Image (tube, coloured by chain):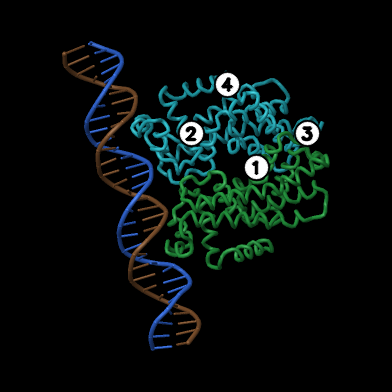
Chain colours: A cyan, B green, C brown, D blue
Amino acid sequence: MTANASAQSNLERSLVEEGQVEILRMAAQCFMDRGFASTSIDDVARRLGSTKGRIYHFFASKADLFFAVAEVGMEFNYAAIDASLKREAPAIERLRDMAFAHCMSMIETQAYQHSVWQGVEIHLRGSTTPEQRERLNALIESRDRYSALFKAVMEEAARDGNIHYGDPSIARQLMFMALNSPIFWYKPRPGETAQDRRRIAQQCTDYALAGLGDSATANRLNA
Amino acid sequence: MTANASAQSNLERSLVEEGQVEILRMAAQCFMDRGFASTSIDDVARRLGSTKGRIYHFFASKADLFFAVAEVGMEFNYAAIDASLKREAPAIERLRDMAFAHCMSMIETQAYQHSVWQGVEIHLRGSTTPEQRERLNALIESRDRYSALFKAVMEEAARDGNIHYGDPSIARQLMFMALNSPIFWYKPRPGETAQDRRRIAQQCTDYALAGLGDSATANRLNA
DNA sequence: AAGTAGACATACTACTGAGTATGTTGTCAA
DNA sequence: TTGACAACATACTCAGTAGTATGTCTACTT
């Protein structure tokens, strides 16, 4: 187990009571493989080698389980970029660091992030009970706050003349699409090292930054 | 109705018998809004102002309807890049054209493309009847062939020294994520013109190409 | 030793939604 | 004008699934 996986595990433990962690992990896997709607609680239970009883003992409903997964996923992201965000450095360097850290988080907590994506994107139509709507809004808000952290640094880097883009909102969407993309196509190779994952994240980050007109990144790639 | 919308409409008509077109349109909308699994045939019927009967008169099953939507979506894409593909021009210029045309197709046939995405990505777990599996494989194959058209032009442009990237497979994923991204966030504004859509597609294309290390695009943006 | 509570498993209920069987209406050919 | 067929609508069936009610076992307390 790498240091990073251990940190992830610690974060999981800090967020939910021990014993729920395995449920969250398997649920995230199922949600990624089949999608929220197509995943039955029995699917998750089967993956756990248990029955529904175990899941409903800890989670009130399927939506409740899903939100728990997605919220933990967002916590991973905030934790991942925290250090980069606090660095004393030019905005462009902080942005590169945050982008890389975010992308690594996508790779290393892929299943959780896939649930976050579904929650925000598909808007989970169907779970329209009042409290669940509340919870969904909170998730989207959390995502917006997270996005705003990048927005601020991007604006600063743009003022410094280090990046250039047209519509800022579209630019941010494009950047996140590039950084998030491993959610959809990453598949761990047998015998893969942390260094391999870092290389993948680096290519995504380079692409994302070059697209934003970061000439330093672009020049480095062209060399 | 714009010339483009008319062309789209003609393509729709050429691919399926008249009368099915409206069903496909509404189905695509529903699949985009709620996702395939969460969309009921009754939902589609309601959107049509009809009942199930109409849908099952033309389509054998829900999966059949879905595949029809996705296949039409892919036809849109092939048609969109056709002219650019045949141009007599340096690879880098053809690539820019294809990327732009593809992105425009994402915007103008968004609902269809969202179904294509779901079909390829979620792999439609659940529709595991033999013929549907066949059809899904055919869809994925179609998508792979489409992707290969870009791959060839990208390799040529790279040989010409006009673009630079690390892992080619990842680079293509990143490019398509940028070009496809309007599927997820584009929302037509009231009073929007074709020019507005072209501007959006242009920004996505610029981002995608700059990420590939197209210095001409990058320099133009930095100017 | 008995009681209690947490951590599940088992066995149900109720409902949603895909698919079908059949009815109805308009149109068009002969 | 009549039958035949396309284009639907209506009214069902049936399987899968979320959620519940209840049972069981173990560990720990007193």
- Say what amino acid the circle numbered 2 marks: Ala
Callout 2 and callout 3 share a chain: yes
- Disc number for residue B177: 1
Q: Amino acid at mark 4?
A: Asn
Whether residue B101 is situated above or below residue D2 in the rendered picture: above
The residue tagged with tag 3: helix, strand or loop? helix
Q: How many marks?
A: 4
Spatial CA distance of label 4 from label 2 is 19 Å
In-image side of B125 versus D13 (left or right) = right
Evaluate if marks 4 and 1 touch, with contact meaning CB atoms under 8 Å apart: no
Q: CA distance from mark 3 to mark 1?
A: 19 Å
Q: Neighbour class for label 1 at 10 Å: few (<14), some, many (≥20)? A: many
Q: What kind of element bears circle 4? A: helix
**Residue A45's x, y, as percent?**
39, 34
CB of mark 3 within 8 Å of CB of mark 1? no
The subunit letter for the residue under badge 1 reads B
On the image, the x and y values in percent for residue A48 come to 41, 30
Q: Residue at x 61, y 48 (%)?
A: B183
* Gap between marks 1 and 2 measured at Cα: 23 Å
Q: Which residue is mark 3?
A: A218
Check the picture and name the quadrant holding the C terminus of chain A.
Answer: top right
Q: Earlier in the sequence, mark 4 or mark 2?
A: 4
Badge 2: chain ID: A
**Crowding near the residue tagged with mark 2, few <14, some 14–19, many ≥20 C-alpha atoms within 10 Å:** many
Q: Quadrant of residue A191?
A: top right
Q: Are marks 4 and 2 on the same chain?
A: yes
Residue occupied by mark 4: A4
Instruction: Tell me where residue B30 appears, x and y as whole percent.
Output: 50, 53
The residue labelled by disc 2 is A28
